[in-house]
C-alpha cells in the first residue's frame, strides 16, 4: 500500500500503529510529561478517532509487513484490532461488512440476501447448466445426514460465478465422495465478514456454520474456494468451536489435491494448453500455510503454468482483501484500482509478459471468491480482457476443463 501510494506516509504500515502506541501510553497508562517526551504526545479527539477509523480501512490485513519486519511487528493485526474496537465499542464499521454482511447473513442465511429456497432454485438451475455444458448428469445433494463432507461455498459464487459450485458438484460426484450442501441458516454460505471487523459477529456466524454441520452429523466441513472463509472457520474459529461443535474442517485445496493426484478422475492436461498463473489468496496461503496442494494440481493439469513473482507465502494481496472487494462507497473503487491492486496487476502482467498477444487466451487461477471479485473489477478497469485476453477463474474450473468424460471447452472464453 505504502509503495503503491507513491510513498505516502499515511500508508506506511507503522503509521497507524504509532498513533495507537502513543494513545496507549497517554490514555491507558495515563502517562504525564515524561511519558509524552519518551513515547510521543498525542491528543485524543473526534478528528483523530475518525482518521484512525479511515486508516484502519486502508490496510487490507494481508500481514505481509509482519513477515518482513525483523522483530515481527504485526501492523496488520493492529489495523484489525482497531476495526474491532471501532465496531464493538463505538458501532463504527463498513456497512458492506456489517449491515449488508454479517447482520443480513444472520437474519436470512446469506450476506447475498438469498434464503435457502432461493439457493436451492439456483443450484438446480446450475446442475442443469452443467449437464448442458459437459454432458454429465449431476444432482447436487442437500441435507444428507451422515455425509462424509459438508461443502460450504461462499454464496456469492452461486450468483456471480455459478460454474464454480457447478464444477465442484461435478468433481465430487465423479470422484465418488459422499457429500452434501446444507439448507440451514448460514449453512449454505461460508462468508464470515466478522473476521474483518468484529469478533462478536464473527463468533455468531461461525457457530451457525458448525451447528449446520452438527445437525447433519457430517464427518467434516470442507470450505469451497474462499480464502477468508477458510481462515475464519478453520483457524480463527478454533477459539469458539469447542466441545461437540469442534467438527473437523478441511480446505477444498487438499481434498481436490487428493482427488486429482490419486487418479480418481481421468484428466487430459492438453485441454488446458494455455498460459495459466496462480494467485495466492493471503488468508489461504500466507495466513494458513496452504501453499502446495493447489500447486500440485496446476502443475499436473496445466502444461503452461507459470508462477507469479513473488509467490506462495510471499505473495502480494489481490488488492481486494479485508472487505475492499465488496466495498464501493466513498472512494474505495478508485483506491482498489489505483493503489491496493497495483502490485498484483504488475505481477500478473509480468507473469504473462511472453504471451501478451490477444491471440493467446490466458488464465489467472484465483481460488478465492473475494480475490476473483477484485480481479474481475481490475481486469475490466484496465481493459485487459479486450486488449490482452487475460481471464480469471477458480481452480475447479480448470479441473473440469480437462476431465475426459466432459465435453471439451468447459472454460468459457468470454468476459464474465
Ligand atoms: S521494526 Fe518492523 S514495523 Fe518497525 S519499522 Fe522495522 S520493519 Fe517496520
Ligand atoms: S497488513 Fe498489508 S496492507 Fe496492512 S499495513 Fe501490513 S503490508 Fe500494509
Image: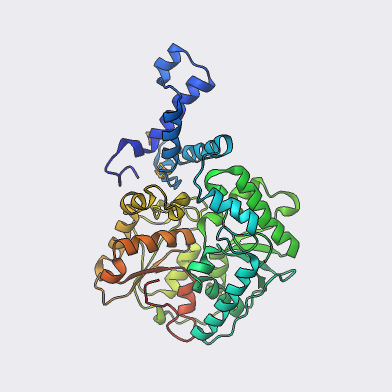
Q: In this view, does 290 lie above or below 13?
A: below
Give the quarter of the image for residue 387.
bottom left
Please provide percent x and percent y for residue 324.
43, 51
Residue 170 seen from this side = no
In the image, taking residue 139 as reference, residue 341 lies left or right, namely left
Please provide percent x and percent y for residue 103.
60, 51
The structure's colour scheme is rainbow
Specify the farthest residue to the top.
Answer: 33
Residue drawn 55% across the image and 61% down it: 112
Residue drawn 53% across the image and 64% down it: 253
Which quarter of the image is occupied by the N terminus?
top left
Residue drawn 55% across the image and 53% down it: 101
In the image, taking residue 3 as reference, residue 67 lies left or right, namely right
Question: Who is closer to the viewer here, 85 or 146?
Answer: 85
Residue drawn 57% across the image and 73% down it: 122
Please provide percent x and percent y for residue 243.
75, 50
Which quarter of the image is occupied by the C terminus?
bottom left
Residue 141 seen from this side = yes
Q: Is residue 368 above or below residue 201?
A: below
Q: In this view, does 46 lie above or below 321?
A: above
Locate ligand 2 by image quadrant.
top left
The count of marks equals: 0
Question: Who is closer to the viewer here, 296 or 245?
Answer: 245
Question: Who is closer to the viewer here, 86 or 179?
Answer: 86
Give the quarter of the image for residue 119.
bottom right
In the image, taking residue 332 as reference, residue 360 lies left or right, namely left
In the image, taking residue 260 as reference, residue 210 lies left or right, namely right
Amino acid at each position: 500500500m505504502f509503495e503503491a501510494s507513491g510513498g505516502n506516509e499515511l500508508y506506511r504500515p507503522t503509521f497507524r500503529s504509532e498513533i495507537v502506541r502513543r494513545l496507549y501510553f497517554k490514555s491507558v497508562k495515563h502517562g504525564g510529561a515524561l511519558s509524552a517526551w519518551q513515547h510521543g504526545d498525542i491528543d485524543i479527539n473526534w478528528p483523530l478517532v475518525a482518521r484512525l477509523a479511515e486508516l484502519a480501512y486502508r490496510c487490507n490485513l494481508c500481514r505481509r509487513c509482519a513477515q518482513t519486519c525483523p522483530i515481527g511487528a504485526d501492523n496488520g493485526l493492529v489495523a484489525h484490532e482497531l476495526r474491532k474496537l471501532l465496531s464493538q465499542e463505538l458501532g463504527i464499521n463498513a456497512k458492506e461488512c456489517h449491515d449488508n454482511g454479517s447482520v443480513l447473513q444472520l437474519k436470512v442465511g446469506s450476506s447475498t440476501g438469498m434464503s435457502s429456497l432461493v439457493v436451492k432454485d439456483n443450484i438446480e438451475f446450475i446442475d442443469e447448466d452443467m449437464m448442458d455444458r459437459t454432458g454429465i448428469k449431476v444432482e447436487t445433494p442437500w441435507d444428507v445426514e451422515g455425509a462424509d463432507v459438508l461443502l460450504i461455498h461462499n454464496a456469492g459464487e452461486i450468483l456471480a460465478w455459478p460454474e464454480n459450485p457447478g464444477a465442484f458438484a461435478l468433481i465430487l460426484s465423479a470422484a465418488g465422495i459422499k457429500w452434501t450442501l446444507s439448507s440451514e441458516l448460514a449453512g449454505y454460505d461460508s462468508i464470515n465478514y466478522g473476521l474483518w471487523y468484529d469478533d462478536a459477529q464473527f463468533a455468531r456466524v461461525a457457530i451457525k456454520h458448525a451447528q449446520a454441520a452438527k445437525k447433519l452429523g457430517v464427518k467434516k466441513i470442507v470450505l469451497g474456494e474462499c480464502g477468508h472463509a477458510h481462515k475464519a472457520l478453520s483457524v480463527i474459529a478454533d477459539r469458539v468451536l469447542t466441545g461437540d461443535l469442534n467438527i473437523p474442517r478441511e480446505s477444498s485445496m487438499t481434498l481436490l489435491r487428493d482427488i486429482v493426484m490419486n487418479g480418481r478422475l481421468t484428466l487430459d492436461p492438453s485441454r488446458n494448453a494455455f498460459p495459466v498463473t496462480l494467485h495466492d489468496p493471503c488468508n489461504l496461503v500466507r495466513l494458513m500455510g496452504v501453499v502446495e496442494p493447489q500447486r500440485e494440481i496446476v502443475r499436473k493439469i496445466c502444461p503452461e503454468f507459470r508462477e507469479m513473482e513473488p509467490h506462495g507465502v510471499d505473495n502480494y494481496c489481490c488488492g481486494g482483501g479485508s472487505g475492499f472487494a465488496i466495498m464501493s462507497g466513498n472512494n474505495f473503487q478508485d483506491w482498489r484500482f489505483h493503489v491496493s491492486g497495483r502490485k498484483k496487476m504488475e505481477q500478473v502482467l509480468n507473469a504473462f509478459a511472453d504471451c501478451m498477444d490477444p491471440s493467446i487466451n490466458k488464465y489467472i487461477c484465483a481460488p478465492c471468491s473475494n480475490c476473483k471479485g477484485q480481479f474481475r473489477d481490475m481486469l475490466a478497469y484496465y481493459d485487459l480482457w479486450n486488449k490482452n485476453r487475460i481471464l480469471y477463474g477458480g481452480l475447479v474450473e480448470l479441473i473440469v476443463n480437462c476431465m475426459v468424460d466432459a465435453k471439451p471447452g468447459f472454460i468459457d472464453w468470454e468476459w464474465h
